[in-house]
Image: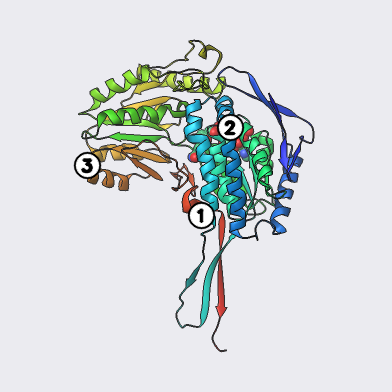
Amino acid sequence: MRNLKLFINNEWVDAEDKRTFNSFNPANKEVIATLSSATKNDVNKAVAAARKAHDIGGWSEIDADERADFMIKAAGIMQRRFNEFAELESMDVGKPINEAKTCDIPYSIRAMEYSANMAREIRGSVIPLPGNEAFNYVTYEPYGVVATIVPWNFPLHIATRSICPALATGNTVVLKPSSEGSVTCNLLGEIFLEAGFPPGVFNIITGSGNIAGEALITHPDVNLISFTGSLETGRRVIEASAKNTIKKVLLELGGKGPFLAEPDCDINAAVISALEGFCFMQGEVCCASTRLYLHEKIYDEFISKLVQKANILKLGDPLDPMTQMGSLINEDHLKKVDVFVKRAIKDGAKLLCGGEKYIIPPCDKGSFYKPTILECSDNKMECVQEEIFGPVLVVLKYKNLDEAIALANDNQYGLEAIIWSENFKTLCHTAQKLNFGMISMNASPLSVIESPYGGNKNSGLGREDGVVGMMEYLKTKNNYLYISEY
Ligand code: NDP
């Protein structure tokens, strides 16, 4: 078991009042680490370290090339510790080790490399003005201190997709991971320390959202908040960001992704994608596709194949490479998911599979929930509208594509939508009409470092990832030089 501390100004320190909390493996309830619970004063120290590191210019004013070299070095160290990070991520949040090895850890390393290399290429522009009287050019500068707050489902991946562009563009960072999944984020401190990052450039505070998180989002010296989490906390972040120093806010919030399958789609491939869409990371994924809209012509065949596959999905020890679905994050969350399912059935949904806790050993010690499919007839039902954040899929039938698009758009969220068809025009037409930040065509939900990630409506504000995501961490400066005679 590890004893992890706060990482402030390149030093590992206890919380001021020495309070700690435990991180559990949700698959067997064993404690895997003890972490420090930051007080408001600890947060103040972390922000002060980040502020100083930014204001002395040692990080923000060096060449992007030099910052990139630090980041590439960090990526190399992560690569060396790949298996250790993958195992810890799997144990900390209950995800199958295969997912940690193919998604979380490689994506985090890629975030370091990609941000480093992209930041070398950032350039300003010259604006032609009428009259030829001035040389007008645009430059980009770091915001200052960035607060990155992340949830527990992809702790390291979500943290690095914010930290890396923030650091590569010259900001300094205070990271606050979720108390349900802090271990790998905490170990990032070791990575950056070994890579030689200057003191104060990167800091980590662990502890509760209500204390450490609140102290961070209300701190006057924080200039930008990158928040990934629930809609409710996202609203609180906006509110707090308007007090004292106005802060820029990036929000990645919830989702209730639609999956549309047209009659001409490749049914076998679409079935696999639909299963992955709601079972990857046990469905605890913001961009999960959890609303399946099937054309009536393929409804029966699709459902029968999907239910068959869902019933044989292998739940098991997340560290077993054969495991396809792991444990939900904790028992309280499992109960929340189960209550949604039971209420849906009471409201008239038909249970096609799952609908209960999975307790065959070794899963009896954890919070495993069977892949669950609910057949629904009304788009307004709670289970169709609300994010359940578990392996629960609702299915509805449609007659024509316009109707399916309207049903898909009829939701408060707008993160990612999926459409399957063999017709190129159908795909493009539908992509245009769906009010979502991301569209996957003939593919499962996608989150890659190279492409902008984010949602419309209540799914968030701004974008992470890609060039667009990187530019979010830079403020624009307009420079006007008068060159004519007075
Ligand atoms: P929460 O909003 O509860 O928590 C997210 C983070 O915010 C955690 O680090 C939490 O700390 C912290 N936090 C909680 N309260 C405050 C506060 N008052 N001030 C500052 N920080 C606070 O979300 P969950 O962790 O439960 O994550 C699930 C949600 O996240 C889902 O709705 C999901 O859709 C969304 N999500 C969105 C993603 C996206 O990219 N769009 C990706 C992944 C998840 P602590 O946990 O320690 O309390």
Residue carrying label 3: 423
Instruction: Estimate the spatial distance between the alpha carbons at disc 2 and disc 3, rounded to whole Å.
Output: 42 Å
Res 150 seen here:
no
Residue carrying label 1: 118
Residue 65 in percent (x, y) is at: 58, 57
Q: Given the image, on which type of amino acid does mark 3 rest?
A: Asn
Near-viewer residue (73 or 45):
73
Tell me the SS state at disc 1.
helix
Marks 3 and 1 close (CB-CB < 8 Å): no
Near-viewer residue (91 or 352):
91
- Vertical relation: 367 (above or below) 176: above
Residue 412 in percent (x, y) is at: 42, 39
Dividing the image into four equal quarters, which quarter contains ligand 1? top right
Instruction: Estimate the spatial distance between the alpha carbons at disc 3 and disc 1, rounded to whole Å.
Output: 35 Å
Res 281 seen here:
yes
User: Which of labels 3 and 1 is toward the front?
Assistant: 1
The earlier-in-sequence mark between 1 and 2 is 2
Marks 2 and 3 close (CB-CB < 8 Å): no
The residue located at (64%, 42%) in the rendering is 175
240 relative position to 288: left or right: right
Q: Is mark 3 within 8 Å of ligand 1?
A: no
In the picture, the disc for residue 85 is 2
Furthest-bottom residue in this view = 485
Q: Quadrant location of the N terminus?
A: top right
